[in-house]
Amino acid sequence: MTEVLVVAVFVAAYVLIATERIHRVAAALAGAAGMVLLGVVDAHVAFYSERTGIDWNVIFLLLGMMVIVSVVKQTGVFDYLAIWAAKRTRGRPFATMVMLVVITAVASALLDNVTTVLLMAPVTLLICERLALPPVPFLIAEAMASNIGGTATLIGDPPNIIIASRSGLTFNDFLVNLAPIIVVLMLVFIGLCRVLFRSAFSYDAERVAALMALDEREVIRDRRLLVRCGVVLAAVMVGFVAHSALHVEPSLVALLGAGALVALSRLDPPQFLEEVEWATLVFFAGLFIMVGALVQVGVIDRLASAVTAAVGDRYLLASSALLWGSAALSGIVDNIPYVATMAPLVQDLVQAGGNAPPARALWWALALGADLGGNATAVGASANVVIIGIAAKNGHPISFWRFTKVGLVVAAVTIAISWVYLWLRYYAW
């Protein structure tokens, strides 16, 4: 009976998150409270258990990176990059879009996609205003580029952070296994942009001349801080790459980097905390508690046993089902709660396969399916929701279906190419 009630509470919270009838943070906290009231979760289960508790590595990795980006923002370097990009393309609309989506994708791989779109979207609105371009296609393209680019690294997309924490995979593992296909997918995505957004590429010679007259160096507000940020960011990236050899978790690398930048910048707390998405961190906490309750009562173990028996050693079948199934489900609900739910199940499947390469490829199928499937709909990924909110706030509303009719095409094409990649790399030989 307890299992049924726990599943009912989880499904109810999941539905509220997916439909956005109430704020997703409220839904996650309500679900977590329900698990406590059912007697399944106590302080130990929620806060201290490695198997069922809040994954503090995820929470503090995100917190550290949010603080780092908040300090970097004070320098004006993101505004500089956007204006620099537009000037290098001489205001040509398609070339400008290509430059912006490439910057977004690279930044999303090095930082995280939600933070990147928060920083890029306002600058994109400014450039579109100066060039008299419709901003909606550019914003949609950036949201999708952030989801694709963020897939390449451990820190690029929140689902990857959850996968890394569950699987023990390193920053280098993600880079080696996912970055090659992401480069290919970005090239394909740029080609899709030329077709899907072709009506947005109008050229205004007078507006272009005005943009070319801007001096991007003037938007750099603190050059000394910019140099310090560059040094600390480089050190943080080295720490991420070498964390397995150094035996230091990525979360601690991010917190050390954040602490160093805060000390070097001498900013007041409100300044370096303004970009921290506290709601996102609280949402994660509530979500981990709900998923932990499923683990605690044995629901995840039962599912894993059933799937393991059905799959056997047919890992190509399992990988294919996981890739396409994850893409479909991540298009319906946010990919963060989906991956948090699936990670324990995939962990059991990989362990049942002796952690051999064909079994371990299930993690890459989950990452690719969830991250790229997030492009399918307006609510499929956090970056999409953030972009839509910024667009609406600035008088450019993006409807659910306007985003989704483009997203379905992009998701289907990128997932199909990813399936070919998984097959060729892990199963064809």
Image: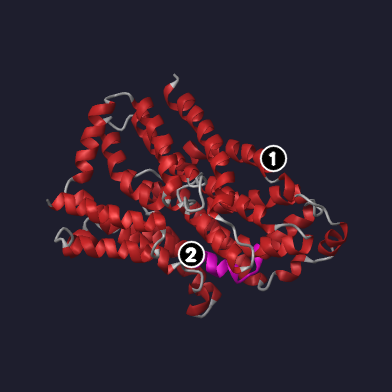
In this picture, which residue range is highlighted in magenta?
Answer: 66-78
Q: Residue furthest top?
A: 429
Q: Is residue 375 left or right of residue 352?
A: right
- Identify which residue, 137 or 98, lies in the foreground: 137
**Looking at the picture, which amino acid does disc 1 mark?**
Val
Q: Is residue 329 above or below residue 67?
A: above
Q: What residue is shown with label 1?
A: 195
Q: Quadrant of residue 21?
A: bottom left
Q: Residue furthest left?
A: 1
Is residue 339 highlighted in magenta?
A: no
Q: Quadrant of the C terminus?
A: top left
Is residue 72 highlighted in magenta?
A: yes
Q: Position of residue 351 (x, y in %)?
A: 26, 35
> How many angstroms separate mark 1 from mark 2 (CA)?
35 Å
Q: Is residue 124 left or right of residue 229?
A: right
Question: Mark 1 against mark 2, which lies toward the viewer?
Answer: 1
Q: Position of residue 305 (x, y in %)?
A: 21, 35
- Identify which residue, 173 or 411, lies in the foreground: 411
Q: Position of residue 25 (x, y in %)?
A: 37, 65
Q: What residue is shown with label 2?
A: 66
Q: Position of residue 224 (x, y in %)?
A: 64, 71
Question: At 19% across and 39% down in the image, what residue appears?
Answer: 302
Question: At 22% across and 62% down in the image, what residue appears?
Answer: 34
